[in-house]
Image (tube, helix red, strand yellow):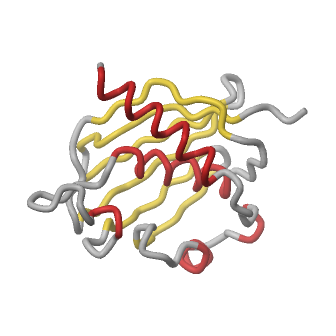
Amino acid sequence: MYWYGLVLIFVLVWVEIVDGNNLTLISDVDSIEALRNRFVTDEWPKFLAFQQNNLTITIRLSVLKSLQWFDGHFPENPILPGVVQVHWACELSKLLFSITTPFEKITKLRFKTVVLPDTKLTLLLEKNVDLKHIAFLYTCDDAVISSGNVRFKEAQ
């Protein structure tokens, strides 16, 4: 329980820090090439495939060992921090669903399995209009890695 509290606090601070970034809207991101061109730093995974169906987006990605997130986390057994998984889900949701309002809260956050370097993942983002949140789910093969619901503030 203690870890979930720390992760949630870190996520809230992290999302507020990165929230000021200017993001391209979905009209400009209609292909895997557009995603690759938008996220080209060592903070982002390699995007392998992209599919959008109305309120659902599926992204196939490779978590390269060269990502900066593995430096020092942990030196002998590097794993991708959970907060990075949440960060990616939030930023990609904002971009791909054209969300312009700030992050509000995260619920039902679960980390089931660690992500090692050079792992291929599938990220499923699903917009729930009734509940006003984005559900995210990371899987590797058929195993659940992490999941949660992200809510953004409503436009005034």
Q: Residue at x 73, y 66 (%)?
A: 24
Coordinates of residue 72 in the picture (x, y in percent): 23, 61
Q: Residue at x 60, y 57 (%)?
A: 52
Q: Residue at x 53, y 30 (%)?
A: 106
Dividing the picture into quadrants, the one containing residue 112 is top left
Is 100 on the left or on the right of 116, as rendered? right
Instruction: Report the label total.
Output: 0
Is 137 on the left or on the right of 38, as rendered? left
Is 76 on the left or on the right of 45, as rendered? left
Coordinates of residue 124 in the picture (x, y in percent): 47, 47
Dividing the picture into quadrants, the one containing residue 74 is bottom left
* As drawn, 70 above or below 34: above
The residue furthest top is 1
Q: Residue at x 69, y 50 (%)?
A: 97
Coordinates of residue 91 in the picture (x, y in percent): 59, 54
Quadrant in which the N terminus appears: top left
Dividing the picture into quadrants, the one containing residue 109 is top left
Coordinates of residue 100 in the picture (x, y in percent): 78, 49
The residue furthest right is 156
Quadrant in which the C terminus appears: top right
The residue furthest left is 76
